[in-house]
Amino acid sequence: MNGKQATEGATELDLSGKGLTVVPSEIGKLTQLKKLILGKYQYNDKGEFIGILRNHLSALPREIEQLHQLEELLIVGNRLETLPPELGQLHNLRFLSLRSNQLNALPPEFGQLHNLQSLDLSNNQLNVLPPEFGLLINLRSLDLRSNQLSWLPAEIQQLPNLKELDLSGNPVK
């Protein structure tokens, strides 16, 4: 389903490659949405993933909090520097990819994503993680490659289900 076909009963929405600079606030009306893609993926003729093409998103609307059913959110290859605290209201979110943006910090409300299992924050500008990361008790995979992290909060060591942690490309001591 693409953005032109979006209806209030939609469960998936792919806005990749639309040249968006902001996500319309009307996104909050799509309360049945389970998957939202805001970054364009490129595939070869065999259907294999081969890369990411950038869009121009620099902000997310606060109305994103109304997407209570959302389980997967991909905001890849954009220009996001910050995230709205309302992102923490997406309690059903299981998979979140914010790869290849310009994020330098995360809001403390990020710790409210208790059902999150996979989180990709690679290729950003993060230099610190909030201690609330320790509340992500279902997190299994955490990709922090290629950021500016020099240390991690001790709370990350307490994550009971964390199986994969990638810190390569960081100045972690």
Image (tube, grey):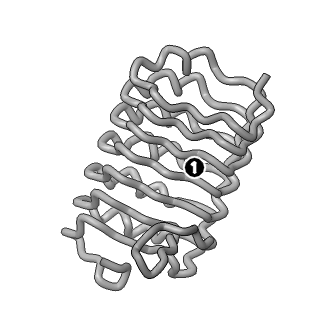
Q: Residue at x 46, y 71 (%)?
A: 24
Q: Position of residue 94 (x, y in %)?
A: 35, 43
What is the quadrant of residue 100 in the picture?
bottom right
Q: Position of residue 173 (x, y in %)?
A: 79, 22
Q: Residue at x 45, y 26 (%)?
A: 162
On the picture, is 53 further left or further right than 28? right
On the picture, is 27 further left or further right than 155? left
Specify the farthest residue to the left: 9
Identify the amino acid type marked 1: Leu
Question: Compared to 28, does 129 lie above or below?
Answer: above
Residue on which the image places disc 1: 83
Q: Position of residue 146 (x, y in %)?
A: 71, 45
Counting the numbered discs, the total is 1
Q: Quadrant of the N terminus?
A: bottom left
Q: Position of residue 160 (x, y in %)?
A: 41, 18
Specify the farthest residue to the front: 46
Question: Is 48 or 18 nearer to us in this picture?
Answer: 48
On the picture, is 41 further left or further right than 81? left
Question: Is 163 or 73 nearer to us in this picture?
Answer: 163
At mark 1, the secondary structure is loop
Q: Residue at x 44, y 67 (%)?
A: 25
What is the quadrant of residue 113 in the picture?
top left
Question: Compared to 140, does 1 lie above or below?
Answer: below
Q: Residue at x 35, y 45 (%)?
A: 93
Q: Residues within 10 Å of mark 1 (few under 14, many from 20)?
A: many
Question: Compared to 74, does 131 lie above or below?
Answer: above
